[in-house]
Amino acid sequence: MSADHVAILDDPGRWGLRVVDGRLHSEGADLTAIAESVGTPAYIYSAAHIEAQFRKLEASVRQKPTLICYAVKANSSRAILELLRRLGAGADIVSGGELARVLAAGFDPSKIVFSGVGKTDEEIDAALRAGVRSINVESTEELERISVRAQALGVEAPISLRINPDVDPKTHPYLATGMQEAKFGIPMASALATALRVVALPGLRLFGLASHIGSQIQDTRPYLDSLARLRVLLSALAERGITLSQLDLGGGHGIAYRPGDPELDVESWGAALAAATADLPMELVLEPGRYLVGNAGVLLTRVLGTKAGEKKRFVIVDAAMNDLIRPALYEAYHVVVPVELAAAQFAEVQTVDVVGPVCESGDFLALGRPMPAVATGDLLAVLSAGAYGAVMAGTYNTRPEPVEVMVSGEQWAVTKARRTIAEIIDAERVPPWMA
């Protein structure tokens, strides 16, 4: 297995990066200079890469009226939300907190879809008061609760039924959400009865159908298979005189994490999707997350030291599983390379585990990875870190969350400051009887 830095040097743009004077840059900004200014660990996001991905997806479905609703759970950075709203995106949310975030970022409620398998009454009320485009419902029990809340508020709730089409997207088991074993969606066998229940319940309006079969999908076929099954339900509803306004096909568009990974041919995918839905008088909704932001983000980390064990060699860095949990949680692969990329060509390649300082055996960023030899103080870049990185970070071991930075051209700005340890502690309270 060859070292990843060679592939990155050959084609940095695939990971949203540039090499200038042998050193990694995000757009025109020097990652070394940013790290020296804000410290590490630090997440860096490229605005240009996010916009390019959005425009590419938008162009792929230009033949069919389509609303692109960014999946906020991928990265809920206020700066990223503001950027995507200005590009014309809507928002796919899964919590009341995300609803508050997108409203604060100025999103039009008519472009917000509220997904999620477990919504509280308070979250339902907030969505109805805001006037969101659609509430994507996943069970009959949830329908009954929304009907009660809508009547109490004197409004009509727009309902899209999230259908579980039992389609295997061939990804990681944790990322497959459209199969019979998943907690998500309404089974196909009961979908028609559930749709008719929406029509019968007061305070509800059957607005559309939805499906989301999983994440990190790099093939068109699973989407078309899901669509074919949804069309059976659409036909059954049409026979009963029920027409819908929206068909939400979810997201899950994959990105390249490893050199050599296939990439979804978005142009061909969009053309196939437009052709397959050309006869449907409904607006499409897509919910991309990772595709838009995944390769826009880099996690910068410094080498704290190296260690030779009896069977392994370790590179110990200041980023840990609390900063980027995907390797520990999903066994996810992230390229890790020196920021001084050109110089790395001449270093000895060693097979190492890149590990953090957290007191857990699962605290690693890369295992058994061929890498150029590094020394204490060297700056490393963990690539493809824009999705499910900072948004899943925590303060385990009382470690402050990483600082976040957005880059646009040669300019950059901190979009989320790093809290101090004192600020973390001061946010907690001792019970009055212990004071």
Image (cartoon, rainbow, N blue to C red):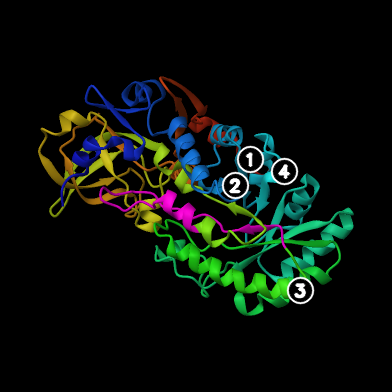
Which dot marks residue 196? 3
Q: Tell me the mark number nearer the camera, choosing from 3 and 1.
A: 3
Taking the spot 43% from the left edge, 41% from the top edge, the residue there is 386
Q: CA distance from mark 4 to mark 1?
A: 36 Å
Amino acid of disc 2: Cys
Q: Is residue 228 visible?
A: yes
Mark toward the start of the polypeptide (1 vs 2): 2
Please report the bounds of the magenta region as a residue range: 244-272
- Most distant residue in the bottom direction: 189
Q: Is residue 369 magenta?
A: no
Residues at marks 3 and 4, CA–CA distance in whole angstroms: 26 Å
Element marked by disc 1:
loop
Disc 1 vs disc 2: Cβ atoms closer than 8 Å? no
Label 2 sits on a secondary structure element that is strand
On-image quarter of the C terminus: top right
Residue 136, given in percent of the width and then of the height, sits at 67, 59
In which quadrant of the rendered view does residue 208 lie? bottom right
Residue placed under numbered mark 4 in the picture: 109
Using residue 189 as the reference point, say whether residue 129 is left or right of it: right
